[in-house]
Image (spheres, rainbow, N blue to C red):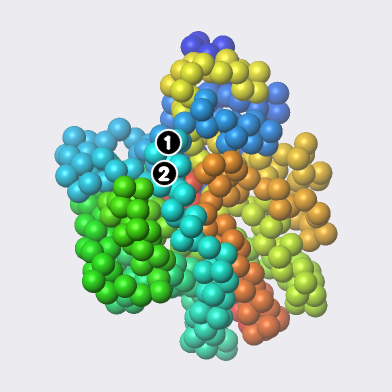
Amino acid sequence: MTSHEYASCPTDADFDPLSPTFLADPFAVLASVSQDAPVFYASSIGYYVVSRYTDIEAVFLDHETYSAAITQLPLVSLEPEAASILSAGGTAPQPSMVSLDPPAHTRLRAPTVRAFTPQRVARMEPRIRSILKQLLNAIDPSAPFDLVAGLAFPLPAAVIFSFLGIPEHDWQQLKQWCGHRASLTFGRPTPTEQVHHSENMAAYRGYLRSFVESKVSAPDDSFTSALLEIHTKEPDKLTREEIVSILYSLTFAGHETTNYLIGNMVRRLLEDPQRWDAVVADPGLIPVAVDEVLRYDTSVPIWRRVTTRSAKLGGVELPTGAKLLLWLAAAGRDSDAFPEPEKFDLARTNSSKTLAFGKGIHYCLGAALGKLEAQLALEALTCRFPRLRLVEDQTFEFRPNLSFRGPEVLWVRAM
């Protein structure tokens, strides 16, 4: 590392979270990062990397100093044509809730919380169990199968889309649009790819506008209708375009994160069969297993913030406008927060304090639903396939993006 000339902090010119080496195993890269530099400047991306639990927690809890404005800002500079397409489609003028600061964030989150009640989440459990049964019944256990394609990907998509009231015949199209969004926002697309992704994101936003309008005349018991009911009673507090923005957040985050959570969970439990066998023998370990996976190999390894004023973090002086890469995966391996962090431990008592869902005013609204899906998926899998094992000698591949990580394919066999 060298000294960053503008902030007098260490610089790592080789750190690149989109490099093949990092994507294949970010924890190997973490092991090579100096423990004396919990905040350093990554010149390859123009971000200050924050790796320590206490520092990341401090950022999440101080929204006045650390703005969420760049959370979903494309990592690369957009081509003018791509930016124009996004603006015309309404994506740029109306950001999603995770990118807003108070008071705009407060105004949008408050009605969302009112509609996203624990009771509404609890009512999803029978639906989740039904989807799991259908998916598992479709699997041929006599041959190896891809757990991602068979369960991890379709389950959360079906759950969140049905929760929002989106008709099933549109689910596949929404999945494709979400893929374009991930690549544009969290990847490093070429100029041609940027235009292609932007066209799809504009179509995605347009679909959600039409969908919200359709629910006005045909309300049901979905989350979308619950938001529209709030709009009808208090139109000044929640506009229809803001409902579109909320759905734009939830349709994406509601399945990308849980898909990878389930994939990471099954991979990490099966890489040491004794872990899997322990959960089979004691289903009471399932909630602990989910929390430990969120700590040990979170499906959201990186999040972002930007300073609104000069600040000192991890001993480093940050200027106004400093872009921060919050390395959540590194925080989960911080020995000051989690003793013996490299050990996957089903007896660990503090895994639930993970920062995988953020903290403070932007704490993930769907955390309870995502954890419920993962727990029910693990319960169903351990009951149906108690002797499940990884297919040997497979290479795991990961989508090249900053913020969502899990195996794209996970081959398993029911012994």
Can you tell which mark lies on residue 28?
Answer: none
Q: Above or below — where is 319 with respect to 199? A: above
Q: Is disc 1 in contact with disc 2, using a CB cutoff of under 8 Å?
A: yes
Can you tell which mark lies on residue 103?
Answer: 1
- Residue at 46% x, 61% y is 115
Residue 405 visible in the current orientation: no
Q: Residues within 10 Å of mark 2 (few under 14, many from 20)?
A: some
Report the quarter where the C terminus lies.
bottom right
Identity of the residue furthest to the front in this view? 233
Residue that badge 2 annotates: 107
Position of 365 compared to 238: left or right? Answer: right
Q: Above or below — where is 194 with respect to 262? A: above
Residue 282 visible in the current orientation: yes
Position of 23 compared to 276: left or right? Answer: left
Between 374 and 250, the one lying in front of the other is: 250
State the separation of the CA atoms marked 1 and 2: 6 Å
Q: Could you tell me which secondary element the residue under label 2 belongs to? A: helix
- Residue at 37% x, 71% y is 165
Q: Could you tell me which secondary element the residue under label 1 belongs to? A: loop
On the image, the x and y values in percent for residue 56 come to 61, 34
| Amino acid tagged 1 | Pro
Q: Above or below — where is 3 with respect to 352? A: above
